[in-house]
Amino acid sequence: MADLSDEERADLVAYLDGELDEQAAQALEARLGNDPRARAEAETLRRTWELLDYLPRTEASTSFTHRTLERLAVQTSSQPVMLPASRWPGRLLALGWVAAVLLAVAAGLGAANWLWPQQQTPRPERPDVEALVVQNPRVLQFKRLYEHADDLQFLRELDQPDLFGDDVGW
C-alpha cells in the first residue's frame, strides 16, 4: 500500500520471515490488529511469498563450479602480482630524520655554550667548624633547640628584647 513507508514494509517482511524479536513482533501484531491498511499489506506480502513456492526450481549444472573457478583464475592471473614492499626505505628515511634532528640539537647546544659561556661561580670556603664552636660554645649547648628553627632570620627575631624581655633566664 502507498501509506506504508519503506521501513514499515521492511518490518512487515521481517515479521513474515520470523526475524523480529518478540517485543517488536508483538508491537507489529498490535498494529496489524488496529490498522486495516497494514493488515492488507501484510496479507498481500504473505500471498506473494506463497506463490514463490509454485515457481520451478533450477539446479546449477555440475560444471558451474568448475567454470566459475576457471574464470576467477584467469581474471586474477592477468593482474600483475604485487610483491610486498620493503620496509627498509621508509625506516631509513625515518632514521635519517631522527639523526638530523639530534645533530641539529647538539649543534644548537654547542653554539649556545660557545656564544654564551656559563660563568663558574666560586664556591665559598667552608668555615672551620671547630674554631666556630670554640668561639660560640652556646650554639653547641642549645643545638637541639636550634634544629627546630626554619632559618636564621627566625632566630634573630626571637632574640629581640621586646619580644620576651631582657631576662631570659637560661
Image: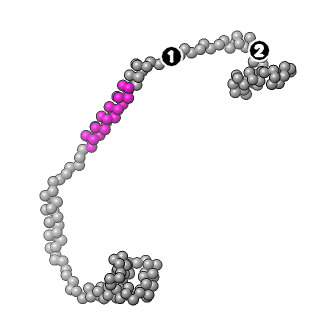
Whether residue 145 sits left or right of residue 123 in the image: it is right
Q: Quadrant of residue 137?
A: top right
Residue 17 part of the magenta segment: no
Q: Residue at x 78, y 19 (%)?
A: 141
Q: Residue at x 36, y 25 (%)?
A: 107
Name the disc covering residue 48, or none: none
Q: Amino acid at mark 1?
A: Gln
Q: Residues within 10 Å of mark 2 (few under 14, many from 20)?
A: few
Q: The N terminus lies in which quarter of the figure?
A: bottom left
Could you say whether the residue bearing mark 2 is in a helix, strand or loop? helix
Q: Residues within 10 Å of mark 1 (few under 14, many from 20)?
A: few
Q: Is residue 40 at least partly visible in the picture?
A: yes
Question: Which stretch is magenta?
Answer: 87-108
Question: Residue 63, how many percent across, how many down?
Answer: 15, 73
Could you say whether the residue bearing mark 1 is in a helix, strand or loop? loop
Q: Quadrant of residue 159?
A: top right
Question: Residue 99, how many percent across, how many down?
Answer: 33, 32
Relative to 52, residue 84 above or below? above
Whether residue 78 sits left or right of residue 34 in the image: it is left
Most foreground residue, 8 or 79: 8
| Residue bearing mark 2 | 137
Q: Residue at x 32, y 31 (%)?
A: 100
Residue 95 part of the magenta segment: yes
Whether residue 54 sits left or right of residue 155 in the image: it is left
Q: Mark 1 or 2, which is nearer the eye?
A: 1
Relative to 59, residue 77 above or below? above
Q: Disc count in the image?
A: 2
Q: Quadrant of residue 35?
A: bottom left
| Residue bearing mark 1 | 120
Q: Is residue 22 at least partly visible in the picture?
A: no
